[in-house]
Amino acid sequence: MTKTIEVDIFGQRYTIKGDTDDAYVKRVAAYVDAQMQQLAGGMKTATPTKVAVLAAINIAHQLFQTEQRCEQGEADVERRALCLMESIDEHLQPARNR
């Protein structure tokens, strides 16, 4: 069921429609607002559009870093699993040759 949720981001009120839990949408909006507020605090001249674009770039960067760590973790798990399987095979080889 589609519902309407109102959130404030960087001093602007937005109406978001969707099926997602209200608390989740508000949490996401609060995160975006915090990112924008933090950026604006460090800028001498900050238009809302400029702050929004920079916040989007920062959030995308965080996403890409997280994806990279996840991929590295998956590769590490695969490497460790392969090493374990090779080790098991090595230990089973003498038993097979008896």
Image (cartoon, helix red, strand yellow):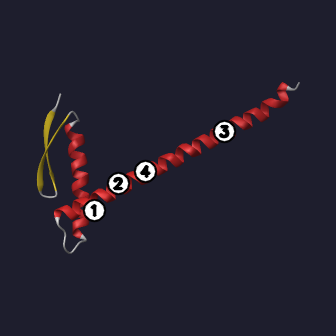
- Counting from the top left corner in percent of width and height, residue 5 is at 14, 40
Q: Which residue is mark 2?
A: 60
Name the amino acid type tagged 4.
Thr
Seen from this angle, which residue lies furthest bottom? 44
Q: Which residue is mark 1?
A: 54
Label 1 and label 2: CA atoms lie apart by: 10 Å
Name the element at disc 2. helix
Q: Which residue is mark 3?
A: 82
Label 3 and label 4: CA atoms lie apart by: 24 Å
Label 2 Cα crowd, 10 Å radius (few <14 / some 14-19 / many 20+): few
Label 1 Cα crowd, 10 Å radius (few <14 / some 14-19 / many 20+): some
Name the amino acid type tagged 2.
Ala
Q: Quadrant location of the C terminus?
A: top right
- Counting from the top left corner in percent of width and height, residue 70 is at 48, 46
Label 4 Cα crowd, 10 Å radius (few <14 / some 14-19 / many 20+): few
**Tag of residue 64:** none
**Tag of residue 66:** 4
Q: Mark 2 vs mark 3: which is more N-terminal? A: 2
**At 24% across and 57% down in the image, what residue appears?**
34
Q: Mark 4 vs mark 1: which is more N-terminal? A: 1
**At 12% across and 58% down in the image, what residue appears?**
11
Q: Mark 2 vs mark 4: which is more N-terminal? A: 2
Name the element at disc 4. helix
Name the amino acid type tagged 3.
Leu
Label 2 and label 4: CA atoms lie apart by: 10 Å
Name the element at disc 3. helix
- Counting from the top left corner in percent of width and height, residue 71 is at 50, 46
Name the amino acid type tagged 1.
Leu
